[in-house]
Image (spheres, helix red, strand yellow):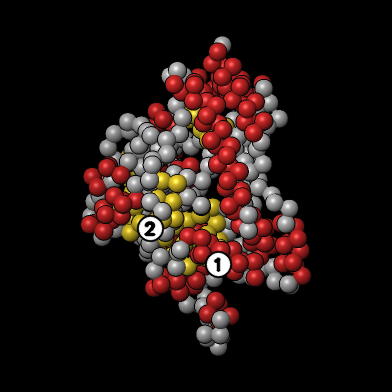
């Protein structure tokens, strides 16, 4: 059976986790947490990176830092994971969904401005499949209307827009290190902070509302409860697991890119014949091969293809059900404008297996089976 996903593993994870135990520091902000944060800061150029227990929690921290309140509105795509909306809905805001572009599956930047009201507080673009949204346009809109930007870059590490790392455009960027991501700590994430002025507040919110981080740096003589907050710190053992992969980030990314390109080359004849559509990467974007998907004619064809591939021991999956059509999306949000593409395109996407140690032979077998399906 070729699984849809296999969590990345390099071989050093257990060694580093053992070191974390021997350091007698397995709670949050230990040596490996610092190594991971410093690696991300160097790789992306962000001013500060704080490792978190999930990308969900990183986004919640961003909502806290923006002081999102009941009555505020946050613009985002409906085609995203629930965490994008949850972070702001938990603070009492309304999620305002706009349509996506059918080529990249990202928020349609041309539709954002029309969705802005006097209650709009922020824009939350989602870089789907590690392919950037049109950040120049989005940042111009935000500046013109005095809005904040929180990038959901859960799938975006090691990807960029015009040479600038995803997650570093907005006030805050959020990475995921879930087991399905390019680099994993099982469950985990990171908050990227652009401005120096936000770092101290972020540390306080992340440390249960205390100035404990300052205390450990010797900046205060005792740590005290300064504000409300929660515990967003991952264990240093989780960070140790992640660091083993960050050390090989280029190798892991290149391996995924190689498989991604093989998928594309082998499935291009089907696309040219009009049977399927393949992912589109804008020329000014560098992606990270987070996923490889195809688009079928419709949901019925997709279901038949998924079942066919399963018969051939290949696990493929579809992706998000648009949030605006879900019960909570109806309660906590609204769709602005026309749903031309969000629902239609979401019903066509089929994700093929993609993981670090996927082999060229496996890709060849998978693509042969996809072609066999359409020959029927």
User: In the displayed structure, would residue 85 be above or below residue 64?
Assistant: above
The numbered mark at residue 169 is: 2
Q: Residue furthest top?
A: 376
Percent position of residue 53, x then y = 58, 59
Quick one: 358 or 146, which is closer to the camera? 358
Q: Is residue 212 visible?
A: yes
- Residue at image point 55% right, 31% down: 263
Quick one: 228 or 266, which is closer to the camera? 266
The numbered mark at residue 38 is: 1
- Residue 228 located left or right of residue 19: left
User: In the displayed structure, would residue 192 be above or below residue 266?
Assistant: below
Bin the neighbour count of mark 2 within 10 Å (Cα to Cα): few under 14, some 14-19, many 20 and up.
Answer: many
Q: Residue furthest bottom?
A: 221
The numbered mark at residue 53 is: none
- Circle 2 sits in a helix, a strand or a loop, which is it? loop
- Residue at image point 44% right, 21% down: 272
- Circle 1 sits in a helix, a strand or a loop, which is it? helix
Percent position of residue 9, x then y = 69, 49
Mark 2 → mark 1, Cα distance in angstroms: 19 Å
First in sequence: mark 2 vs mark 1: 1
Q: Is residue 228 visible?
A: no
Percent position of residue 58, x then y = 49, 59
For the N terminus, the quadrant is top right
């Amino acid at each position: 059976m070729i699984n849809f996903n296999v969590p990345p593993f390099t071989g050093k994870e257990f060694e580093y986790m053992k070191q974390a135990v021997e350091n007698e520091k397995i709670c949050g902000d230990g040596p490996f947490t610092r190594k991971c944060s410093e690696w991300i800061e160097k790789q992306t150029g962000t001013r500060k990176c704080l490792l978190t227990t999930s990308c969900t929690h990183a986004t919640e921290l961003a909502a806290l830092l923006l002081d999102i309140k009941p009555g505020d509105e946050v613009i985002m795509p409906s085609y995203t994971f629930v965490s994008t909306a949850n972070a702001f809905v938990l603070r009492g805001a309304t999620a305002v969904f706009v349509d996506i572009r059918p080529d990249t599956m990202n928020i349609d930047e041309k539709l954002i401005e029309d969705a802005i009201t006097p209650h709009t507080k922020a824009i939350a673009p989602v870089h789907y499949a590690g392919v950037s949204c049109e950040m120049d346009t989005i940042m111009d809109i935000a500046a013109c209307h005095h809005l904040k930007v929180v990038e959901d870059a859960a799938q975006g590490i090691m990807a960029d827009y015009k040479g600038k790392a995803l997650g570093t455009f907005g006030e805050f960027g959020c990475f995921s290190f879930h087991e399905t991501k390019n680099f994993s700590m099982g469950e985990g994430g990171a908050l990227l902070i652009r401005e120096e002025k936000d770092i101290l507040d972020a540390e306080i919110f992340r440390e249960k509302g205390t100035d404990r981080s300052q205390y450990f740096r010797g900046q205060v003589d005792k740590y005290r409860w300064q504000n409300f907050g929660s515990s967003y710190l991952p264990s240093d053992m989780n960070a140790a697991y992640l660091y083993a992969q960050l050390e090989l980030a280029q190798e892991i990314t290149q391996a995924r890119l190689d498989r991604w390109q093989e998928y594309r080359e082998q499935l291009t004849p089907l696309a040219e014949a009009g049977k399927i559509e393949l992912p589109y990467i804008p020329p000014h974007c560098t992606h990270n091969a987070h996923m490889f998907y195809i688009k079928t004619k419709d949901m019925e064809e997709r279901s038949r293809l998924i079942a066919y591939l399963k018969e051939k021991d290949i696990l493929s999956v579809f992706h998000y059900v648009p949030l605006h059509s879900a019960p909570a999306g109806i309660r906590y949000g609204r769709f602005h404008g026309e749903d031309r593409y969000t629902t239609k395109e979401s019903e066509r996407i089929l994700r093929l297996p993609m993981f670090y140690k996927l082999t060229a032979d496996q890709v060849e077998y998978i693509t042969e089976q996809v072609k066999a399906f359409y020959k029927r």
